[in-house]
């Protein structure tokens, strides 16, 4: 399993935690670092990707297979991360 899939699977395990939980935010930071394999992720790009996870059928379908509410959870945690 590649790095980003591990991060997504670990996030599934965090969905029951309170928003802004340190464990979840560590995983979002790892997700942000993983994006650097493709481009430098600005705060705006990270926010946009969080929105795309919810609104793009391709992303929504992919995440729905892991957990139906993962896209909304991930978007919320990305926004918290970006607000810091």
Image (cartoon, grey):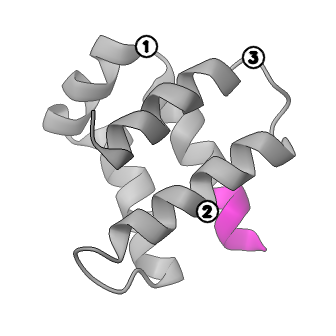
Query: Total marks drawn?
Result: 3
Give the mark nearer the N terminus: 2 vs 3: 3
What segment carries the magenta color?
A: 79-84
Give the main secondary structure, helix, strand or loop, of the magenta stretch. helix
Which of 59 and 39 lies nearest the eye of the viewer?
39
Q: Secondary structure at mark 2?
A: helix
Estimate the x, y position of residue 70 in percent, counting from the top left.
48, 26
Residue 4 vertical placement versus 13 (above, below): below
- Which quadrant is the C terminus positioned in? bottom right
Q: Which mark is residue 29?
A: 2
Q: Is residue 82 magenta?
A: yes
Q: Residue 14, relative to residue 67: is it above or below?
A: below
Give above or below for 62 relative to 67.
below
Whether residue 75 appears in this view of the structure is yes
Q: Is residue 60 inside the magenta stretch?
A: no
Report the residue marked by disc 3. 16
Q: CA distance from mark 2 to mark 3?
A: 19 Å
Q: Nearer the viewer, residue 9 or 18?
A: 9
- Return the mark for residue 67: 1
> What is the x, y in percent for residue 80?
72, 58
First in sequence: mark 3 or mark 1? 3
Residue contact between numbered discs 3 and 1, judged by CB atoms under 8 Å: no
Find residue 45 and report its horizontal and vertical position in percent: 39, 75
- Against 37, residue 80 (above or below) is above
Which residue sits at x=34%, y=36%? 5
Quadrant of the rendering where the N terminus is positioned: top left
Q: Which residue does the image show at 65% across and 70% down from the upper left? A: 82
Q: In this view of the protein, can residue 20 be seen by the observer? A: no
**Mark 2 crowdedness (10 Å alpha carbons): few <14, some 14-19, many ≥20:** some
**Disc 2 to disc 1, C-alpha distance:** 20 Å
């Amino acid at each position: 399993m590649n790095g980003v899939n591990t991060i997504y699977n670990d996030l599934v395990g965090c969905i029951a935690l309170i928003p802004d939980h340190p464990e979840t935010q560590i995983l979002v930071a790892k997700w942000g670092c993983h994006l650097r394999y493709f481009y430098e992720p600005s705060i705006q790009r990270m926010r946009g990707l969080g929105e795309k996870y919810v609104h793009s059928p391709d992303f929504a379908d992919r995440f729905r297979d892991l957990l139906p509410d993962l896209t909304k959870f991930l978007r919320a945690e990305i926004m918290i991360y970006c607000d810091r």
